[in-house]
Amino acid sequence: MELWKELEFEIKHCSKCNLHFNRKIPVIGEGDINTPIMFVGEAPGAEEDVIGKPFVGKSGGLFTKIFNSVNLSREDVYITNIVKCHPKDNKNPEDDEIKMCSQYLETQIALINPKIIVTVGLISTKWFLKEKANIGITKLRGKIFNWEGDIKVIPIFHPSYLLRNQSTTQGSPKWNTWQDMKLIKNEYEKLKNRD
Ligand code: SF4
């Protein structure tokens, strides 16, 4: 717990990259730090910046519904982002910002020691699956990749993308996300049954 407190203090007071100039509250992450499963998005949005929690507002509401669709709760997992401060105008974080901030993510992963990491959206997926940086999220989502030995990385669409693609017909991004969440839930249950 001491290490978590130190990490949170460091992030709250961090000015290592330009994103600190405009942020209101750094979004460190939330959820169960003893969980075997992490969800990692790209960066806090404007609403997250004000509240200091990941995935709130419209896309956060959909994110919660996505969990509920497979009887998973956000409290069962740990949710964070690649960068902890909101990029102005919702721009994608720059490479140097990602490089600086991902040191905190690496520490979070080391402390949680997850068995599954769900990458939410392309930027997060690219950070984990560097060698697949040129492949689009449409082709990567719903597949299981090995990362750093025995950690399973499973990419899914970002909820903000799903908000722009409302169809729920078979083969649509929303329908595919539901299939991906069923796969994730199944992998999670296998871990729970192993314990
Ligand atoms: S984005 Fe990360 S590295 Fe940049 S100021 Fe915020 S906490 Fe520090």
Image (cartoon, rainbow, N blue to C red):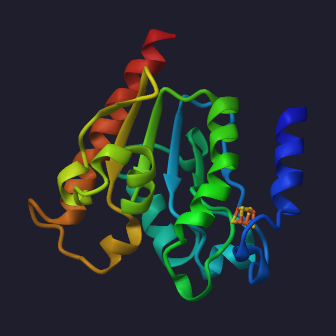
User: Left of 106 or right of it: where is 166?
Assistant: left
Q: x, y (%) of residue 10?
A: 86, 53
| Residue 68 appears in the rendering | no
Q: x, y (%) of residue 16?
A: 78, 64
Q: Nearer the viewer, residue 168 or 172?
A: 172
User: Left of 115 or right of it: where is 44?
Assistant: right
| Residue 33 appears in the rendering | yes
Q: Nearer the viewer, residue 95 or 84?
A: 95
User: Left of 49 or right of it: where is 44?
Assistant: left
Q: Quadrant of ligand 1?
A: bottom right
Q: Quadrant of residue 22?
A: bottom right
Q: x, y (%) of residue 176?
A: 20, 55
Q: Nearer the viewer, residue 127 or 157?
A: 127
Q: How many marks?
A: 0
Q: Nearer the viewer, residue 110 or 173?
A: 110
At x 78%, y 72%, the residue is 25
Looking at this rendering, what residue extends furthest in the front direction? 96
Relative height, residue 116 to residue 170 (above, below): above
Q: x, y (%) of residue 83?
A: 62, 61
Relative height, residue 8 to residue 157 (above, below): above
Image quarter where the N terminus lies is top right
At x 46%, y 27%, the residue is 148
At x 70%, y 31%, the residue is 111
